[in-house]
Amino acid sequence: MAEYRLGEVEMKFAELIWENEPLSSGELAKISEKELGWKKSTTYTILKRIQERGLFRNEGGIVTSLVSKQEFLSGQSAQFVEETFAGSLPCFVAAFTSKRKLTDEEILELQKIIESSR
Protein backbone atom coordinates (compact mmCIF):
# COMPACT_ATOMS: atom_id res chain seq x y z
CA MET A 1 0.00 0.00 0.00
CA ALA A 2 1.30 3.45 -0.90
CA GLU A 3 2.25 6.01 1.72
CA TYR A 4 0.47 9.28 0.93
CA ARG A 5 3.01 11.62 2.46
CA LEU A 6 5.66 13.60 0.64
CA GLY A 7 7.72 16.57 1.69
CA GLU A 8 7.68 19.72 -0.42
CA VAL A 9 10.77 18.80 -2.46
CA GLU A 10 9.62 15.20 -2.90
CA MET A 11 6.26 16.47 -4.15
CA LYS A 12 7.95 18.67 -6.78
CA PHE A 13 9.97 15.65 -7.88
CA ALA A 14 6.86 13.43 -7.99
CA GLU A 15 5.10 16.00 -10.15
CA LEU A 16 8.01 15.89 -12.62
CA ILE A 17 7.50 12.15 -12.92
CA TRP A 18 3.70 12.39 -13.27
CA GLU A 19 4.07 15.08 -15.96
CA ASN A 20 6.67 13.17 -18.00
CA GLU A 21 6.07 9.46 -17.45
CA PRO A 22 7.03 7.02 -18.69
CA LEU A 23 10.61 8.22 -18.85
CA SER A 24 14.07 6.76 -18.48
CA SER A 25 15.90 7.31 -15.22
CA GLY A 26 18.61 9.18 -17.18
CA GLU A 27 15.98 11.48 -18.68
CA LEU A 28 14.55 12.03 -15.19
CA ALA A 29 18.02 12.97 -13.93
CA LYS A 30 18.36 15.56 -16.72
CA ILE A 31 14.92 17.04 -15.99
CA SER A 32 15.70 17.13 -12.27
CA GLU A 33 18.96 18.93 -12.94
CA LYS A 34 17.19 21.52 -15.10
CA GLU A 35 14.08 22.01 -12.93
CA LEU A 36 15.43 21.39 -9.43
CA GLY A 37 19.18 21.96 -9.78
CA TRP A 38 19.91 18.39 -8.65
CA LYS A 39 22.87 16.16 -9.40
CA LYS A 40 22.23 12.68 -10.76
CA SER A 41 22.98 11.11 -7.37
CA THR A 42 20.34 13.27 -5.66
CA THR A 43 17.75 12.26 -8.25
CA TYR A 44 18.45 8.57 -7.73
CA THR A 45 18.41 8.92 -3.92
CA ILE A 46 15.01 10.65 -3.92
CA LEU A 47 13.65 8.25 -6.54
CA LYS A 48 14.65 5.31 -4.35
CA ARG A 49 12.99 6.95 -1.34
CA ILE A 50 9.65 7.48 -3.06
CA GLN A 51 9.82 4.02 -4.64
CA GLU A 52 10.01 2.56 -1.13
CA ARG A 53 6.74 4.35 -0.36
CA GLY A 54 5.00 2.46 -3.15
CA LEU A 55 4.34 5.48 -5.36
CA PHE A 56 6.69 4.89 -8.29
CA ARG A 57 8.83 2.18 -9.84
CA ASN A 58 12.05 2.13 -11.79
CA GLU A 59 11.99 -1.07 -13.78
CA GLY A 60 14.53 -1.68 -16.52
CA GLY A 61 15.59 1.96 -16.26
CA ILE A 62 12.04 3.21 -17.00
CA VAL A 63 10.30 5.26 -14.31
CA THR A 64 6.51 5.05 -14.04
CA SER A 65 3.94 5.74 -11.35
CA LEU A 66 2.14 3.05 -9.39
CA VAL A 67 -0.26 5.69 -8.06
CA SER A 68 -1.67 8.49 -10.23
CA LYS A 69 -1.46 12.07 -9.03
CA GLN A 70 -5.24 12.10 -8.49
CA GLU A 71 -5.10 8.87 -6.46
CA PHE A 72 -2.24 10.31 -4.41
CA LEU A 73 -4.10 13.55 -3.65
CA SER A 74 -7.24 11.61 -2.78
CA GLY A 75 -5.30 9.31 -0.45
CA GLN A 76 -3.48 12.24 1.10
CA SER A 77 -6.78 14.01 1.77
CA ALA A 78 -8.36 10.90 3.29
CA GLN A 79 -5.29 10.38 5.48
CA PHE A 80 -5.45 14.01 6.66
CA VAL A 81 -9.15 13.76 7.57
CA GLU A 82 -8.54 10.44 9.35
CA GLU A 83 -5.58 11.70 11.39
CA THR A 84 -6.84 15.21 12.12
CA PHE A 85 -10.62 14.77 12.44
CA ALA A 86 -10.86 11.11 13.48
CA GLY A 87 -12.15 10.32 10.00
CA SER A 88 -15.14 12.67 10.30
CA LEU A 89 -15.80 14.50 7.06
CA PRO A 90 -18.50 16.67 8.70
CA CYS A 91 -15.97 17.80 11.33
CA PHE A 92 -13.50 18.65 8.57
CA VAL A 93 -16.10 20.67 6.63
CA ALA A 94 -17.19 22.46 9.83
CA ALA A 95 -13.59 23.41 10.61
CA PHE A 96 -12.96 24.51 7.02
CA THR A 97 -16.07 26.66 6.83
CA SER A 98 -15.55 28.28 10.24
CA LYS A 99 -12.91 30.56 8.68
CA ARG A 100 -14.15 30.73 5.11
CA LYS A 101 -17.75 30.82 3.99
CA LEU A 102 -18.71 28.74 0.96
CA THR A 103 -20.03 30.46 -2.14
CA ASP A 104 -23.40 29.47 -3.58
CA GLU A 105 -21.56 27.76 -6.46
CA GLU A 106 -19.41 25.75 -4.06
CA ILE A 107 -22.48 24.67 -2.09
CA LEU A 108 -24.19 23.48 -5.27
CA GLU A 109 -21.06 21.62 -6.37
CA LEU A 110 -20.78 19.93 -2.98
CA GLN A 111 -24.45 18.96 -3.08
CA LYS A 112 -23.88 17.33 -6.49
CA ILE A 113 -20.88 15.42 -5.15
CA ILE A 114 -22.88 14.19 -2.15
CA GLU A 115 -25.80 13.10 -4.35
CA SER A 116 -23.53 11.24 -6.77
CA SER A 117 -21.80 9.36 -3.94
CA ARG A 118 -24.97 7.82 -2.52
Image (cartoon, rainbow, N blue to C red):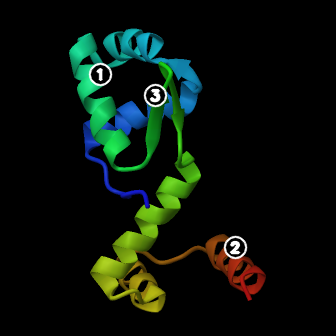
Which mark is in front, 3 or 2? 3
Which disc number belongs to residue 109? 2
Q: Residues under labels 1 and 2: Cα distance? A: 40 Å
Question: In this view of the protein, which residue sits in the foreground, 107 or 68?
Answer: 68
Residue tagged 1:
43
Q: Residues under labels 1 and 3: Cα distance? A: 11 Å
Query: Residue at the spot x=34%, y=50% of the render?
Result: 53
Query: Residue at the spot x=23%, y=11% of the render?
Result: 39
Mark 2 residue type = Glu
Which mark is in front, 1 or 2? 1
Would you say 85 lies left or right of 26 here? Answer: left
Looking at the picture, does residue 18 appear above or below residue 72? Answer: above
Question: In this view of the protein, which residue sits in the foreground, 114 or 96?
Answer: 114
Image quadrant occupied by the C terminus: bottom right
Residue positioned most to the front: 60
Q: Tell me, yes or no, if residue 56 can be seen here.
A: yes
Would you say 80 lies left or right of 89 here? Answer: left
Residue tagged 3:
16
